[in-house]
Image (spheres, rainbow, N blue to C red):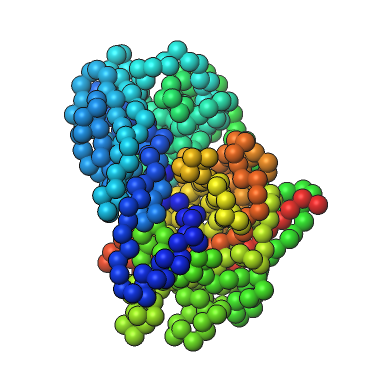
Amino acid sequence: MRFQNKSLLVLTCLCGLAAGMASGAAIADSQAPSQPNGVSAQAIDSSSVRVSWNQPWDNVGIEGYNVYRNNQYYATVFNTNYIDYAVTNGSYEYAIVAFDAAKNYTSLSAKAAVTVGGGNSSQAVVSTNNNQNLAVPSALRATIQSGNEAIIYWTAPQGDVKGYNIYRDGGYISSTSSTEYRDTQLGWGQDHRYYVVAYNHNNTFSEKSAELLVNTNNNRSAEQILSDPVQAAPAPVQQTGGVPDGYRQVFADEFQQYSLDPNKWNSQYRWGPWLTINNEQQFYVNSIHNPDFGHSPFSFDGENMTISAIRTPEHLRSSANWKPYISGALTTYNKFKMKYGYVEIRAKLPKGKGLWSAFWLLHNNENDRRPEIDVVEYIGDKPTVAYNTYHYYDQNGNLQSSPTMEAWGPDYSQEFHTYAVKWEPGLITWYVDGVERNTYQNGNAAWEDMYLLVNLAVGGAWAGNPDGSTPFPARMTIDYIRAYQKN
């Protein structure tokens, strides 16, 4: 997980926060982050290992991580992955300690073990549980995008699967938690052979899949362009989305008016404007309840609503809590909530370094689990990726997250696209433009009332800071937001 969960338990600390702001006194931070989990280690080749982990929760924000190799401190990094380029054939164990700005340190995480070499240096071989069977990815297929680009798809095997290693022409090229991979490094008119290896949360690896032959020369026949070494690859099985049969609409805003509907929306988070999550750099203007603020991030053209982020004008800096940017957020908290159903947004998302737009569902009541479903998150300097994630807290108060699943596509900032979730007991399914892209199936999938949120953040632990290339105003334009439930 690349970022801190938005669903911070903030309501319980607002009184202390307000007192601290009134007095001007600094608030001491003595709370350590939660212990990092999901640590994995994968051998990239005979001289390097990729270590990755989920971002833990902290009441203020994660500052960085100390990486331990074979029980000894090894390196400090500031994101949730590290590549160790100083390995040789042999076995290694990695563990992670997280720390915040106040230098509160977690305990050492669980260890991830990996063996480099031993016959196939392109993939990780876990030193324990190596005799467990993991089914093989199947039905490899491809869609040609251009003369040097193709998207490779496959069908996920049954069981505990954390991710996949992708191999091209016999060599490792990448890992992903999704069941697709976009390869932009192909040679035009050349044959390339792919296979995929699955791995689970114990870092046990499957056997390699059947190979897929891909050639981007569109002058060749379809049988030549996309074929298995033995037979043609099966056609992709695309499950179309849209409103499921037997569902009725329970919420909608088509944004065809010229102002926000206060019966449907709040224009701030439930915890108010003064607490900023994820180290973000924007101030969300509460345009509904503070129309005289001096600027509204919400605009309408009779067909769409646009949320705009701008640099904070000098005369509004004190009103904006001295944040360098102003933007907007909407929620249906205390207006609309739902338990299971189908939700969809049609939007054009903003491109640019440091921009982080999102449409999500959050727990309606404060409790131990605090689930969150991210229908879509979009990092502006990665314009061809839409992210899908589910978060919750376990019984020990530790943040747990699904893999941050990727839905690769075109540059999503160039056109309107639909992003949707079908939420059922024990199952969450994500769609982009009506096509199923990712799923999460587990008994811990949210089973309580949740409400809708949409926002355009600037900066933060995942998106990073804007730079000189970031366009301002940055605009997230929304055609509609709709929600449905079973009849």
Identify the residue at image location x=45%, y=51%. Answer: 5
Identify the residue at image location x=41%, y=35%. Answer: 38
Whether residue 164 appears in this view of the structure is yes
Q: x, y (%) of residue 27?
A: 33, 63
Q: Quadrant of residue 233?
A: top right
Horizontally, residue 371 falls left or right of residue 76, namely: right
Q: Give the position of the N terminus as an image quadrant.
A: top left
Identify the residue at image location x=29%, y=44%. Answer: 105
Q: x, y (%) of residue 112?
A: 35, 27
Horizontally, residue 362 falls left or right of residue 447, namely: left
Quick check: 115 above or below 268?
above
Which of the pair 260/22 is nearer the observer? 22
Horizontally, residue 18 falls left or right of residue 418, namely: left
Q: x, y (%) of residue 393?
A: 51, 44
Which of the pair 25/57 is nearer the observer? 25
Quick check: 373 above or below 70?
below
Q: Quadrant of residue 343?
A: bottom right
Quick check: 136 above or below 484?
above
* Number of marks drawn: 0
Whether residue 140 appears in this view of the structure is no
Identify the residue at image location x=60%, y=80%. Answer: 259
Horizontally, residue 417 falls left or right of residue 202, namely: right
Quick check: 180 above or below 481?
above
Q: Quadrant of residue 288?
A: bottom right
